[in-house]
Each structure stands twice: as structure tokens, then as C-alpha cells.
Amino acid sequence: MRAMLLVNPKATTTNARTRDVLIRALGAAVDLSVEETAYRGHAAMLAATARAKGFDVVAVLGGDGTINETVNGLLNPVDGVDTERPALIVIPGGSANVFARALGLPNDPVEATGAVLEALRDGRRRGVGLGQALWEGESRYFTFCSGMGYDAEVVRAVESLRGAGRKATPGRYVNTALRHYLATDKRHPAMTLTGPGIPAAEGLFMAIISNTSPWTYVGARPVRPTPWASFETGLDVLGLRRIGLTTLTPVIRHILTESDRLPGGRHLVQLHDEAEFTLTAARPVAFQLDGDYLGERESVTFRSIPNALQVLV
């Protein structure tokens, strides 16, 4: 079996020694080529090249951003030439590792490598559905979440801190979210949600789009705004028409529990297992995808892509 391993050398939770151990372990099981990512978008290019060259598997050691790039490279053929898509191996190396943990993998990269080696030996594969976001002639797949509005503004702020050399720790996300909340406009919602067979929902301040649950983690604690979401169903949405403390406090308290019930409240908009919908904004609003800030947008269409990937897990 020919495999290409994409390594993010700047991955948060790994070092050179750990990477060497993982590479030797994988190399003993497959015919392994190793490539290090060097810049934003590099993982997507390498994954697309692996597909064009007929690799059986693409493994990725990195965080959710590197995994997202890899997935997009696997799904987008080089020069439009459609070839058989390699299977995916995920080895968590970031700060949150939401996709890996949602697949049921250990959060430790060494333990996760042991799990995927077992999957290789046993031939275990899992079909995983993805989300797709489309805007202004562009499109991008996402593995676990997207969002427009307040949550994307927090992602933007944390990315700015990372650019200044600070780590994206759970505490930093929480502190940034609290500080940003105080400065957020809470009186002028911008977004409207529409879709085939979906009643229009107007006046949204933010919308969380989920392809699985949990949506993210705060340390070891899962955050579950859409507890019914899964890789085997369509997309789920939680939208908020108000973001005052009386609305947010019970929602936050609920989504930090292990409950399988949906959060309640008359100012919430909730959708489950949807194939397609569109968020349109009266003004440009922040947009994130798998925790990667993608700028401000006025309209984004979201689609569910069933069984898009085969993952060894």
C-alpha cells in the first residue's frame, strides 16, 4: 500500500522526536513517502498530487487546519482529471483536534497512530460525509463545522493573536470570546437563513453549522450546540436571533453538558439533517470554516456531501 504522510512541522502538540517515532511506525506498515508542509495551502496541493499519482492512502499529522486543507486536496482533482480518491488517515497534532476526536481517535498522536495501525491491519474503513461551503464562485469542504457571525469573529481574533506568536489554547479562546462579546453589536442582526423547504429565518446574529458533534472542545470538555449532528446525516444549524446574556447564558450552560437534547429558547433557530441552505447578510459578516477564518461574506450556501471520504479508523 502506497501512502503519503503530510506533516505540519509547526503542529502544536508534537515535536521532532515524536514525529520521527510516528514516521517509523507508519513506514513499517506501508510504503511511505513523507512531505512537510511549508505554507498555507501546501497540504491541499500535496494531497491533490498524491491523488493524481495514485497513492492508496494520504495520512496527515497536524491540526484541524492542516486536515481541512488535505481533505480539500483529496476532493479536488489536479487539472480536472478525476482519479480514484485515496483513503485518509488522521493523526492529531493540533490544539483542539476536533475532527480526529469526532472520529473516535485518541487525542494523543502516539496512541492515535496505534489505533490507525490497527485499522490498517484489519482493513477498517469508515465512510464520512462532509459539508461544502460555496460563495462568489468559490467552494471549500469542511469536516466538522462552519460559522458566520459572532463565532467567526472570535476565530478571527484568535488568529490575530496566533499571528503575534501566542498559542491557541482553550483558555485563550474563552478569554477572547468574552472580551469580544463586550464589543459586539447586539442590536442589529444581519443574516437571513433560507433553503429548499425551509421557512425563512430572519434577524440572525450568528449561525453555527455542524457536520458532526461535538462542535468543538474546551480542553477535554465537548461543546455540543447541535447534539444530533453526525457524519452520517446532513448538516445541522444553530442560529441565534439575540445574543444578550439572558439568551446566551442558558444556551452556553446547556451546550457544555453531555445532554442529547437540543438547547431550548424562543430566540433560537435550529435545523437538523439538511441537504442545503443559504445564509445571506445585509452587510459583510465574518465567516469561518473548520476553525479557519476566511474573511467577511454576504452570502454563503452550505451543502451536505454524503460519504465523501473513506477514513481508516
Image: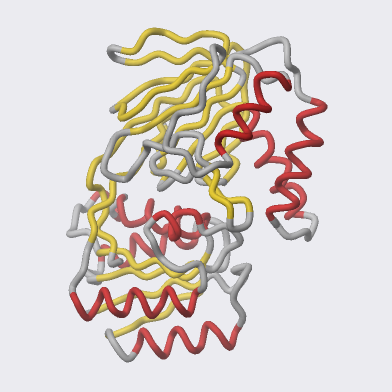
Q: Is residue 271 above or below residue 82?
A: above
Locate residue 160, reporting x and y percent: 74, 47
Q: How many numbered marks have been drawn onto this rendered protein structure?
A: 0
Judged left or right of residue 13, residue 167 is: right
Q: Quadrant of residue 226?
A: top left
* Image point (27%, 54%), residue name: 309
Q: Tell which of 65 and 183 is nearer to you.
A: 183
Image: 80 above or below 270: below
Q: Quadrant of the C terminus?
A: bottom left
Name the residue located 56 percent from the left edge and 68 percent from the top edge: 38
Question: Which quadrant of the rendered structure holds the N terminus?
Answer: bottom left
**Frontmost residue, 122 versus 165:** 122
Q: Is residue 274 above or below residue 26?
A: above
Q: How is the image coloured?
A: secondary structure
* Residue positioned 28% across, 53% down in the render: 77
Query: In the figure, is residue 185 to the left or right of 305?
Result: right
| Residue 260, picture quadrant | top left
Residue 83 point in image, percent of width and height: 18, 58
Residue at 36% in and 33% down? 235
> Residue 274 at x, y = what percent?
31, 26
53 vs 160, left or right, is left
